[in-house]
Amino acid sequence: MSETELVSACQQYLTLKGIFYWRNNTGALVSEYKGKKRFIRYGATGSPDIFALKDGKLIGIECKFGKNKQSEGQIEFQRQMEKNGAKYLLIYDIEQLLIKL
């Protein structure tokens, strides 16, 4: 299973359970408008793959596969979420989501 497939499996589970969530994309791209190139960055650096709301609590869900690890930005985002009362889940397989959620 790839990280993309894990994110998809998590979304399917959240849908099945009726939990409100949204996929959170981050990245950057180069675009051109009226002959001018622009560098566009979107999403908050380090933010998790999925945000969910359950019982009034914000949950960040970061999906990793194999030996992949969180970036420094993701670790800091997790720290800030938890410091402010939100829950953050680092998921390596779908079973972890079932247990931790």
Image (cartoon, rainbow, N blue to C red):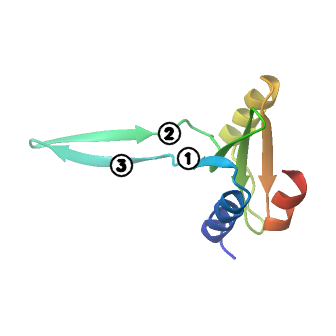
Question: In the picture shown, does residue 53 fall above or below 12?
Answer: above
In the image, taking residue 74 as reference, residue 39 lies left or right, namely left
| Numbered badge on residue 24 | 1
Disc 2 designates what residue? 43
> Given the image, on which type of amino acid does mark 1 rest?
Asn
Callout 1–callout 2 Cβ contact below 8 Å: yes
Q: Position of residue 62 (x, y in %)?
A: 71, 51
Of helix, strand and loop, which one carries label 3? Answer: strand
Quadrant in the rendering for residue 88 = top right
Which residue is outermost to the top? 84
What's the residue at 32%, 40% (across, down)? Answer: 39
Task: Tell us which disc is closer to us: 3 or 2.
Answer: 2
> Given the image, on which type of amino acid does mark 2 rest?
Gly
> Given the image, on which type of amino acid does mark 3 rest?
Leu
Circle 1 residues within 10 Å: few <14, some 14–19, many ≥20: some
Disc 3 designates what residue? 29
Q: Position of residue 85 (x, y in %)?
A: 81, 26
Which residue is outermost to the left? 34
